[in-house]
Image (spheres, rainbow, N blue to C red):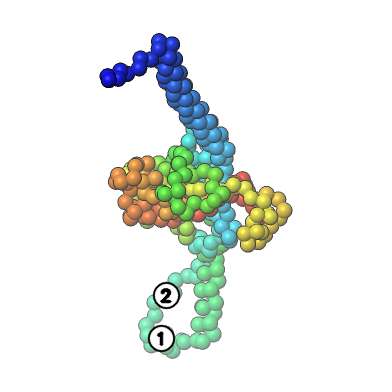
Amino acid sequence: LKLSRPRVPPPAAAFLRALGAMADAAAAAAAEAEADEERAGQAERSAAAALRMEEVEGDYTFRSPDGHTDVVLRLTAGGQWWHAAHRRAEERCRIATGAGRAPRAEQQNFLRAYKDFNHAGVHAQQSDSMQDYAAEHQVVSVWEIAESLGSWRMLEQNAADCPDLPNDCQALLLLSCQHWSWKCSHPTAPSAFRPTDEGAAELDGFLDASVLTLCYALRRARHAAEAAAEGETGATGRPEPRTLELQAHIHPSVVAGTEAGEPGVARHARMRSMQAAFQTLGFARAYRDGPPPPP
């Protein structure tokens, strides 16, 4: 007995073909919806990034504990920044003047000087010397300012590259320095920022090689209750200002803007350039949003 394969009636075949077409259409619609969702997500992320950039712009300040140095970091529209460290102090300086100087003693031979020696005269001469010293030295107000310019951009917060970022980090900023200058009121007065000739040449080399970069994390404003809960003192009951905090251990590929595995900025060069930024340009480890606190 020979069995034959049953033939599918024409209506059933049409139904299967229609069912397959419907499945293909559903898959295509799902793929299109997923693509639309991805595009919408990218647009939202771009809009959020632009909004964060607008929120980041502004002045961030720091004041030294002794109150002599004020530092401002200004993030402007278009990704540009300006930084200035202004130091004021009072120094005892020598004033170039001929007033009050004792006349030059005439030369005498040894025997005459021994014979005419007078203790009272010696003490009077010492007193005159002290008065001359006081007349030639004076306390004056001095100032110096270290300025720098550059560009800034926002980085992706990748946990693999930035494991030590604070939990309340709102944005990760990369500052690249391009120009610098130093000015003062009295070139011979003691200085905190003035570099040596070798230091200035090294700093210029860092700028030419584009390796002077600093990474800061923008931490959101916290209420005093949150600060107290974390063991911090000085709660005032008002929201604390946002802060910019240095992130010195960011992965070199992030700082250099390269992919993982590609050569970036050498660690030694990064550490030396960071040292120059702090010593010569007056950068601080942390800034607060807005004007500095009152002295």
Query: Which residue is tagged 2?
Result: 106
Q: Amino acid at mark 1?
A: Arg
Res. 227 image quadrant: bottom right
Q: Identify the residue at image location x=46%, y=22%.
A: 26
Q: Identify the residue at image location x=49%, y=62%.
A: 94
Front-most of residues 141 and 258: 258
Residue projecting furthest to the left: 2
Front-most of residues 267 and 283: 267
Residue projecting furthest to the bottom: 115
Q: Residues within 10 Å of mark 1 (few under 14, many from 20)?
A: few
> In the picture, which quadrant includes the N terminus?
top left
> In the picture, which quadrant includes the C terminus?
bottom right
**Is there a contact, CB below 8 Å, between mark 1 and mark 2?**
no
Front-most of residues 286 and 97: 286
Q: Secondary structure beneath disc 1?
A: helix
Q: Is residue 146 depicted above or below 116 in this figure?
A: above
- Please provide percent x and percent y for residue 75: 52, 40
Q: Is residue 245 depicted above or below 20 in this figure?
A: below
- Please provide percent x and percent y for residue 99: 53, 63
Q: Residues within 10 Å of mark 2 (few under 14, many from 20)?
A: few
Residue projecting furthest to the right: 237
Front-most of residues 170 and 183: 170
Q: Identify the residue at image location x=30%, y=46%.
A: 261
Residue 157 seen in the figure: yes
Q: Amino acid at mark 2?
A: Glu
Q: Which circle marks residue 112 in the picture?
A: 1
- Please provide percent x and percent y for residue 209: 32, 44
- Please provide percent x and percent y for residue 212: 39, 47
Distance between the Cα atoms at labels 1 and 2? 12 Å
Q: Identify the residue at image location x=34%, y=45%.
A: 260
